[in-house]
Amino acid sequence: YAVSEDGINWLRRDNDLIISGKFNKWDEKGICYPSVIEINNKIYMFYSGKKYGKSGLGYLILKNSNAL
């Protein structure tokens, strides 16, 4: 998780994002290429796992929208 005011200089906020739940073998070693969208007032993040999503895609649902 990182934020930027100008799209060039980024500030990492690793401790501000906590991902919980059980990971499977295809995504336990990495989450990459995320895409975040809002549907019906819920925030979703779709992502690929190891090997560029060869085994599929995963998704997360933001539980606390106040974190944004």
Image: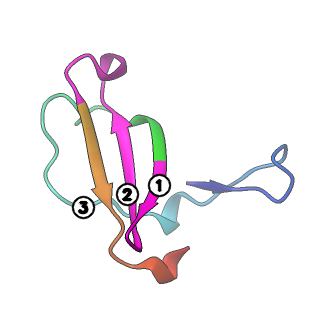
Within-10-Å neighbours for mark 3: few <14, some 14–19, many 20+:
few
Q: Is residue 49 magenta?
A: yes
**Three-letter code for the amino acid on which mark 3 is drawn:** Ser
Query: How many other residues sit within 10 Å of disc 2, few (<14), some (14-19) or many (≥20)?
Result: some
Q: CA distance from mark 2 to mark 1?
A: 5 Å
Q: Which residue is rendered at x = 56% and y = 73% of the image? A: 68
Front in this rendered view, residue 51 or 35: 35
What whole-number distance in Å separates the C-alpha atoms at marks 3 and 1? 19 Å
Say what amino acid the circle numbered 1 marks: Ile
Type of amino acid under label 2: Tyr
- Identify whether 54 is placed above or below 8: above
Q: Quadrant of residue 65?
A: bottom left
Residue sitting at x 24%, y 61%:
20
- Mark 3: which secondary structure? loop
Q: Residues within 10 Å of mark 1 (few under 14, many from 20)?
A: few
Upstream in the sequence, badge 3 or badge 2? Answer: 3
The residue beneath circle 2 is 44
Q: Are marks 2 and 1 in contact (CB under 8 Å)?
A: yes
Q: Which residue is mark 3?
A: 20
